[in-house]
Amino acid sequence: MSAPRYIFAGALFVSAWGPCAALALTQQEIDWCAGKDATPELQINGCTAVIQSENIPANDLGSAYKTRGLVYARRGDYDKAIADFDAAIRVNPQFAIAYNDRGASYGRKGDFDRAIADYNEAIRLDPGNSVTFRNRGFAFFSKNDFDRAIADFTTAIQLDPKDFTAYTDRGNVYRAKRDLDHAFPDFDEAIRLNPSFVPAYGNRCFAYNDKGDNDRAIVDCDEAIRLSPNDAAAFVNRGVAYRDKGDDQHAKADFDEAIRLDPTLTGTVQRLRSRPWQRTLRCYLLALC
């Protein structure tokens, strides 16, 4: 139900060690770096062993840095991730995925201008990667550049017509523009492509709230909660729908559950218990403010 997420687009690490490299590494370290039967910590250790070995082909060295950076990024350690993506790019300046993943890390840090610069380079090197267009679209969205965001999400869909996430992302931008006539078809298509995709239900619920169709909003939020019972934002949104219907008992129950699931929402929920609520909710769910 949240805003579009960055996707770290990394191919699995593929080992191609030469005879000298094999002498400096164990097969287990190679497998760990490739993510085979490895915890994140073991994967970091395996990639570190690869990086510190001698006679590693440049492409494999770049992949080891990128793979370790990806593990750091997934752990939320974006500074270490960026340092590894920097190293991967130094080793292989044509490494499009490393630019994408570094851009995603900058985006997670809120540095959208540097994120966009990296996505631009990734697209120049690999214009057929739909994920990079989707990531750049979210960076534009975060800068309130809605038209460019829509253009990038549209390109992502053209490259991958089954990308239900891109439909949801584009629907979010249309909703932010208050263009519900275009938002609903995108959410509908995302759900058609993946009937279990929680964000599509959650965001369509929000759109129905925008439209004042509280009953249909509740139906969508019910489904989001059924699929993801710990989705605090879905409880917030359903609470708004119940409140607007005058069902204070159910609204209170949903608001209370949202706070239980995510105590950081306490201030937001308290403001939503009484009008005006629209801007507060939009800021929380879409990170537009």
Image (spheres, rainbow, N blue to C red):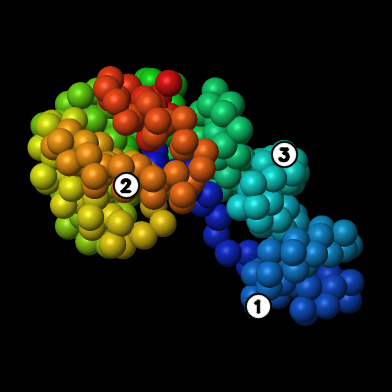
**In the image, is 207 to the left or to the right of 52?**
left
Residue at point 22% right, 61% down?
Answer: 195
- Residue where numbered disc 2 is placed: 254
Give the residue type at disc 3.
Answer: Asp
Q: Is residue 41 above or below residue 130?
A: below
Residue in front for this viewpoint, 208 or 47: 208
Q: Residues within 10 Å of mark 2 (few under 14, many from 20)?
A: many
Residue 47, quarter of the rendered image: bottom right
- Residue where numbered disc 3 is placed: 79
Q: For residue 75, say whether it is visible.
A: yes
- Residue where numbered disc 1 is placed: 37
Give the residue type at disc 2.
Answer: Asp
Mark closest to the chain's N terminus, 2 or 1: 1
Mark closest to the chain's N terminus, 1 or 3: 1
Q: Is residue 21 above or below residue 206?
A: below
Give the residue type at disc 1.
Answer: Asp
**Residue 257: x and y, percent?**
39, 50
